[in-house]
Amino acid sequence: MSMTPLTATAGRLTSEGEPLNYLNNGHGLKSWLLTKDHKRIALLYLFSVSFFFIIGGIFALLIRINLLSPEGLFNPDTYNRIFTAHGIIMVFLFLVPAVPAVLGNFLLPIMIGAKDLAFPKINLLSWYCYVVAGIFLTVALIAGGIDTGWTFYTPYSTSYSNSNVLLAGVGIFIAGFSSILTGINFIVTVHTMRAPGMTWFRLPLFIWAHYATALVIMLGTPVLAITLSLMALERVAHVGIFDPAMGGDPVLFQHMFWFYSHPAVYIMVLPAMGVVSELIANLARKNIFGYKFVAMSSLAIAVFGFLVWGHHLFVSTQSIYLGIIFSFLSYAVAIPSAIKVFNWTATLFKGSISYDTPMIYGLGFIGLFLIGGMTGLFVAALGIDVHVTDTYFVIAHFHYVMVGGSLMGFLGGMHLWWGKITGRMYPEYWARAAMVIQFVGFNLTFFPQFILGYLGMPRRYAAYPPEFQVLHVLSTAGATILGLGMLITIIYFIWSLKNGERAPANPWGASGLEWRTSSPPPTENFLETPVVTWEAYEFAPIETMDVLGYPGDPGKPSQPVPAEHGTED
Amino acid sequence: MSEHIVPKKIYYRIFGALLVGTALTVIFAFINLGNFNIVAALLIAIAKALLVITFFMHVKYSSRLTKLWVAVGFIWLFIMLAITMTDYLSRAWLVYRP
Ligand SMILES: [Cu+2]
């Protein structure tokens, strides 16, 4: 497709004499709440996602405080509502939207050389869906909370629980639409709005990962909506679908719920994997080893991730024969994940590695995701799973994947692109310190939980036998350290908005179109539509950086490399 | 992207066909076909859904990529239903001999 040259704000200055960019192009609340700029919507998402991350984090600390003593601090009913709140907020309001709706929204159009996403208004609508979902869930929490766990297992959720199941169900239903709208935007944008010369195999792996994520969102999320609707139908109208007392089957709910919720793990972790590819490639200044394999492994994860949901049902009445197949397929889906981990590691070989914060987040991701993934194989084994189902072993496993994977990826990406997003650099010393503190805190929180789970500590219990106390106290201590690390990050990010060094267009000497426009970018992303004549992750030798258009001097927006051959799609 | 203009006549015909489908569903509900009542009801429902998707949702006039996406959606639905149903099919196979 052809694109018209961009002139609207090109090279213009604000009244204060600063170069016009997306941040100072329009002021006031209205210019933000009604914006159609994908970059501003990404920032709206960043604020709201961070808000709910802090709320979810507070609930996590309440859980850990409760478990300091064997008899528990809160009464069991309150405790049920606390861990449910933690789960629902973290899964639906943080992990699912965090990377795609913030970093994906901001970077996807820039990385492919487009002016915006394909449907800017739908993008804004997606954020409003998120906000409405957040309001519903907040009201559900304030009005007494939900006590079913984030999984809403039937028949408890439909026939017995007297907590705000419906309100939360509606909230999650709407949150689902928020991610569907983001997904459809990503797919259409990648298909139709790539800059001239940006072929599929020149796309950054971040884009491949987000395309695969959008695939999962589009194919999985409607099932969540259907499942929640059926749950509501049974709860309100007593139509017997899941409750055996009314002729339903509770395992049917688990089938449908996990048909979405297992792939949802990939909605959370695939975009983070895309981020890690960028972190590793750019801070080792090397093309990702086996680019095509890494790109295709994203699609493989997206597709095969839909065929393994039954590994959550091994101790239900699910057919043992189907269990064997699900166990086998769960092992198979580890292969594409392993391809990524091996290829990132191979990329480091003979790279010129910088240990700046984004890279150590990338390395942290690899280490923690490795542990999370490998323990995933433990729980995918039929025999071991009987022993560890619904224990802290599972809790530790998926926190290594979620926090060690998604959160590390999200924070690593926030550091890599912080200068691009805000125009200011974060303080490197504090960032490294915070990352190390988080890493130590995280492992101290969750490693003891593997042991606890293996010894038989069940999840979701408010009290436990006294011999588990040492491990629980260690875990709580770790959570405190992890929280402290997060707090430091939040503080220096806010501090840097005013006091950070001004970010040059390309602070990392990185490849990728987003580094060939100013920091922060103009509203239309590029002064003129870039024409891509280079392969993905093509790093010029450091001496020739200026020749290839990498800026040496801070603040000067770099120009795209002039096209050698005309415009091709 | 060019918008395909569909003559109103086609919409009315499809609407008519959907009404006929609804009438058939009601009629079949009063005829005892044993197990085949559900088969008949589902077949009519599928036919109606296909009409809506092809004409009302303009899939017939869309690009091949859109058609692919629509097909993938149904394949995924099939995956969910088929694998879930194999659970019900094979649950009772295991015989416990104490
Ligand atoms: Cu799973």
Image (cartoon, coloured by chain):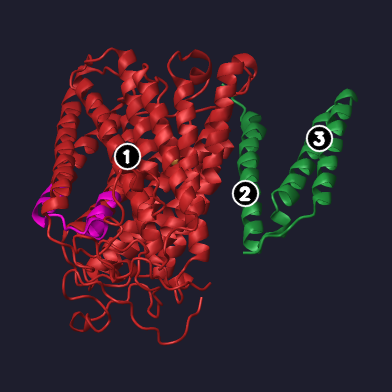
Chain colours: A red, B green
- Asked if disc 3 and disc 2 are in contact, CB closer than 8 Å, the reply is no
Please name the residue that numbered disc 3 is placed on.
Answer: B39
Mark 3 or 2: in front is 2
- Say whether mark 3 and mark 1 are on the same chain: no
**Circle 1 or circle 2, nearest the eye:** 1
Placement of A291 over or under A177, stated as above or below: below
Looking at the picture, how far across and down is residue A389, in whole percent?
A: 40, 31
- In the picture, the disc for residue A48 is 1
Mark 2 highlights which residue?
B73
Taking the spot 23% from the left edge, 16% from the top edge, the residue there is: A72
Which residue lies at the image location 39% right of the left edge and 29% below the top edge?
A135
Name the quarter showing ligand 1: top left
Query: What number is the disc on residue A93?
Result: none
> In the image, is residue A420 part of the stretch drawn in magenta?
yes
Spatial CA distance of label 1 from label 2 is 31 Å
The answer for how far apart the CA atoms under marks 1 and 3 are is 48 Å
Q: Disc 2 marks which amino acid?
A: Gly
Identify residue type, mark 1.
Ser
- Please state the extent of the stretch shown in magenta in the rendering: A409-435
Secondary structure at numbered mark 2: helix
User: Which residue ends up furthest to the bottom in the rendered image?
Assistant: A564
Residue drawn at (15%, 55%) of the image: A426
Toward which corner of the image does residue A74 lie, by quadrant? top left
Is any part of residue A372 visible from this angle?
Answer: no
Between discs 3 and 2, the one toward the N terminus: 3
Q: Position of residue B32 (x, y in %)?
A: 89, 24
User: Whole-Å distance between the Cαs marked 3 and 2?
Assistant: 22 Å
In the image, A321 versus A22, the foreground residue is A22
| Above-or-below relation of B21 to A192 | above
